[in-house]
Image (tube, grey):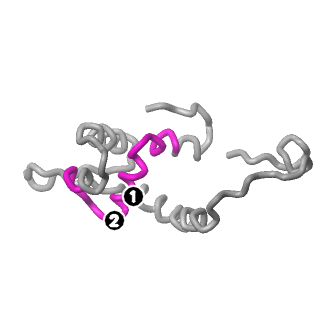
Amino acid sequence: MRSYDQFCGLAYALDVIGDRWNLLVVRELLLGPRRHRDLVEALPGVASNLLGDRLRALEDAGIVARDAADGRKSVVYSLTPAARTCASRSSPSCAGAAVRWPPDPGPTTPSDRPGSGSPSRRC
């Protein structure tokens, strides 16, 4: 997994879920627990082995929980309570961002630009 190597909550979150497919896996698990096969079907284009790698990485990061129910062969994946709380808190932000698309093009006057006395946009 690549890293931004920055001491910032947002940068760390991107380190964990910023890889291709990870955020889409989280989106699917927000709908409820899913089996590997369910996720493959819901994410057209993802290879089964790549999805397995992503699920293991998300599990190692504490975002996804893996449950092998009562000796059955099938494994069910779900979001951990902490990941679900974080995702539910960010959902209104995501909805608001979609309404404001395309994004603001940025500062239009020299006095609005970072380094000109105005606060910079940082983590």
Amino acid type, mark 2: Leu
Q: Which quarter shows the N terminus? A: top left
Q: Residue at x 39, y 46 (%)?
A: 21
Disc 2 residue crowd, few under 14, some 14–19, many 20+, Cα 10 Å? few
Residue carrying label 2: 31
Q: What stretch is highlighted in magenta?
A: 14-38
Tell me whether the residue at label 2 lies in contact with that at label 1, contact meaning CB atoms closer than 8 angstroms. Answer: yes
54 on left or right of 70 = right
Q: In this view, does 95 lie to the left or right of 32?
A: right
Disc 2 to disc 1, how far (Cα)?
7 Å
Image spot of residue 58 (x, y percent): 36, 44
Tag 1: amino acid? Arg
Q: Is residue 59 left or right of residue 82?
A: left
Q: Main secondary structure of the magenta part?
A: helix
Please state the horizontal and vertical placement of residue 76, each as a whole percent of the image.
21, 54
Please, is residue 18 above or below residue 84 in the view? above
Residue 79 placement: quadrant: bottom left
Residue drawn 57% across the image and 64% down it: 98
* Residue 43 position within the rendered picture, expressed as x and y whole percent measured from the top left: 31, 52
Q: Residue at x 47, y 60 (%)?
A: 87
The dot on residue 112 is none
Percent of width and height locating residue 24: 39, 52
In the rendered structure, does residue 19 fall within the stretch colored magenta?
yes
On screen, residue 60 above or below 5 = below
- Residue 49 belongs to magenta span: no
Q: Is mark 1 on a helix, strand or loop?
A: helix
> Is 120 placed left or right of 23 in the picture?
right
Q: How many numbered discs, if any?
A: 2
Note whether 120 is above or below 95 in the view shown. above
Residue density around tag 1, few if under 14, some if 14–19, many if 20 or more, within 10 Å:
few
Q: Residue at x 29, y 38 (%)?
A: 50
Per the image, the residue denoted by label 1 is 27
